[in-house]
Image (tube, rainbow, N blue to C red):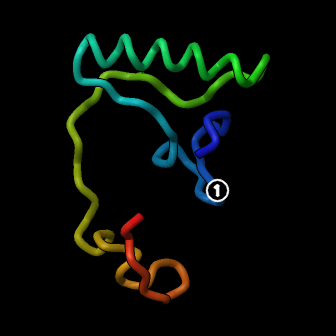
Amino acid sequence: VDPLTVNGQGNDRGRQYRTGVYYHSKEQEELARVRFISEQQKYDKRKIASECKQASPFWPAEKYHQQYLEKGGRFNSPQSAEK
């Protein structure tokens, strides 16, 4: 993940591909903001584009998007999603 990329990662572009850290509590927010400050120092004057926001309701993707890698992914070649 490139934290400097605005609304995209790799070849995927659009607001739905933005990166961020989403917190649920004040403690998580504080930890995230401290880390953002620390990470920002690595990039000199280039601003981190990843957002740091309070978590909102999560909506799972449609069924046909589930198990994308196991179903063959972009190249129709099934693979394990385990890391």
Q: Please give the residue where the numbered disc 1 appears in the rendered image.
A: 10
Counting labels gives 1
Q: Quadrant of the C terminus?
A: bottom left
Say which residue appears at 41% left-offset and 76% top-offset: 69
Residue 39: x and y in percent read 61, 22
Q: Is residue 4 above or below residue 60?
A: above
Answer with left or right where residue 62 lies relative to residue 14. left
Say which residue appears at 46% left-offset and 47% top-offset: 16
Q: Which quadrant of the figure has residue 71?
A: bottom left
Identify residue type, mark 1.
Answer: Gly
- How many C-alpha atoms fall within 10 Å of the one at disc 1: few (<14), some, or many (≥20)? few
Q: Which residue lies most toward the bottom here?
A: 77
Answer with left or right where residue 45 lies relative to residue 48. right
Answer with left or right where residue 76 lies relative to residue 8. left
Secondary structure category for the residue under label 1: loop
Say which residue appears at 60% left-offset and 50% top-offset: 9
Q: Which quadrant of the figure has residue 68?
A: bottom left
Q: Which residue lies most toward the right here?
A: 45
Residue 60: x and y in percent read 23, 55
Q: Which residue lies most toward the front here?
A: 83
Residue 66: x and y in percent read 28, 70
